Image (cartoon, helix red, strand yellow):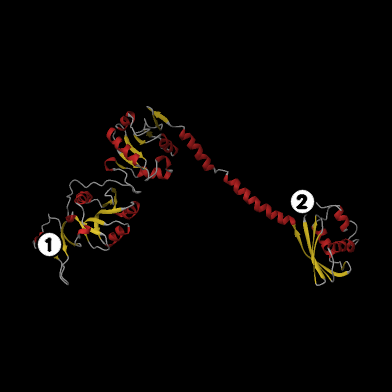
Amino acid sequence: MGKLAQTSVKYLITAEFEAEGTVEKPDVIGALFGQSEGLLGHELDLRELQRTGRIGRIDVEVTTIKGKSKGDITIPSSLDSTETALIAATIETIERVGPCDAKLFCKSIADIRAVKRKQIIERSKVLLKELMKDVPEISTLAEELMESVRSADITNYKGCPSGPDVESSDSIIVCEGRADVLVLLKHGIKNAIAIGGTGVPPAVAHLTKSKETTAFLDGDRGGDLIFKELMQVGEIDFMARAPFGKEVEELTKKEIFKALREKVPSEQAVELAPLKSKIHKFERPANKPAHNVTTVRIIPSSKKGGKDIPDKKHSALLNRPERSNDRPPVRVVTVSPITKKNELSEEQKKVYGEQLNELIGTHAASIYDKKNNFAGRVPVKNLETALKQVAEPLTVIVDAEVDKKLCKMVEDAGAENIIAIKVKEKSGKVNVFIQENL
């Protein structure tokens, strides 16, 4: 008997049988061939079909329980659907298996090609997905082409890597290295020049004196040092910085243009403090007095139910007649008496006092850590974010009114002291010092 090649199978006939006695596999197969012989003519005889390979190997599984047998029959077919259905109906005519009465029933005819089609579809999805990963979009190809053209535009200005428009442009951008110039060229900025190290070449220093110059530096300590040298040997008009901890060559297009939009005049720029937010120095207008508020400190009464009374040093201020318009307003605030445990050292008083005077009128805050190192200066609205970036904050000096919200913010950040001009209300364990405490 020939064996049907597995690749040519189209359908799979599945049938089940029951026999009133004990039978074995050869009995079932013999019954299939013997009792179907001649029913459909010579062309559809099971023996002939199997010999020519149009019917495959017939598999039978038999189980005998309590003297009765039952099992499953599978017949692979490469015939068309009509002929396969005829074969399936033919085997149902079998009435005996071996010496026993039996019944056969066709359960199903499965289309093997449908299963294969499903497998083909699922596999093609996987292959297509992998293929699409390697096919770049037209926009990506165009961008890569433009990048290669821009990168090819890098030139040298008296030995310094630069963009092609450095000499012709009215303004220039001074960067640290060649990689910075390349990334700016990549995004269409052609008037950049690199100093190529920590020393500023004379050619770059001379160029800054004839053109509007923006220093675009890395967000690290090296950027601070280069900015100092640029200010000493050249004329820098503006300063732009990469975000804290990043270099210019690492920035995306969006980050580059954001940094350049947020450039600040060089006279307002300060060293990069260990904060992730941009830090600028705030200058008090020359015509603005350092003190616009006279503060009277009230010492809470130690007597139960007693009233707060001013200390003798300032009692005369409360009894004055109505102030004239040219005097600053008198604000009366109450602060907790400072215990010895919470006192500031003389050095701290001096440093904090000077810093507080600088902050007046700026709406800014300065932060010192527990080693009394200056951590940075930020607008008051950014104070909460800035405090999270300082490892061990100790003191916050703020040009704002102290209230419960500010106290909670400072205390939650782990700081211990607030230095301010005025106090509205205090809460928590944080120490509040006003100008007269310093």
Q: Nearer the viewer, residue 386 or 136?
A: 386
Where residue 137 sits in the image (x, y, percent)?
A: 54, 44
Please rate how many residues cluster around mark 1, counting C-alpha atoms within 10 Å: few if below 14, some from 14 to 19, many from 20. Answer: few
Q: In this view, does 148 lie above or below 309?
A: above
Q: Which of 167 and 438 is in front in this view?
A: 438
Which residue is disc 1 drawn over?
311
Q: In this view, does 289 lie above or below 68?
A: above
Where residue 151 sits in the image (x, y, percent)?
A: 46, 34
What element does badge 2 sit on? helix
Please rate how many residues cluster around mark 2, counting C-alpha atoms within 10 Å: few if below 14, some from 14 to 19, many from 20. Answer: few
Q: In this view, does 301 lie above or below 395?
A: below
Q: Nearer the viewer, residue 211 or 65?
A: 65
**How far apart, in angstroms, are the residues tagged by discs 2 and 1?**
105 Å
Q: In the displayed image of the protein, which residue is found farthest to the front?
A: 341
Residue 189 location, quadrant: top left
What element does badge 1 sit on? loop
Residue located 65% across and 50% down the image: 124
Residue 254 location, quadrant: top left
Amino acid marked by disc 1 = Asp
Which residue is disc 2 drawn over?
7
Where residue 370 sits in the image (x, y, percent)?
A: 28, 52
Residue 99 location, quadrant: bottom right
* Residue 140, label in figure: none
The answer to whether 113 appears left or right of 232 in the picture is right
Amino acid marked by disc 2 = Thr
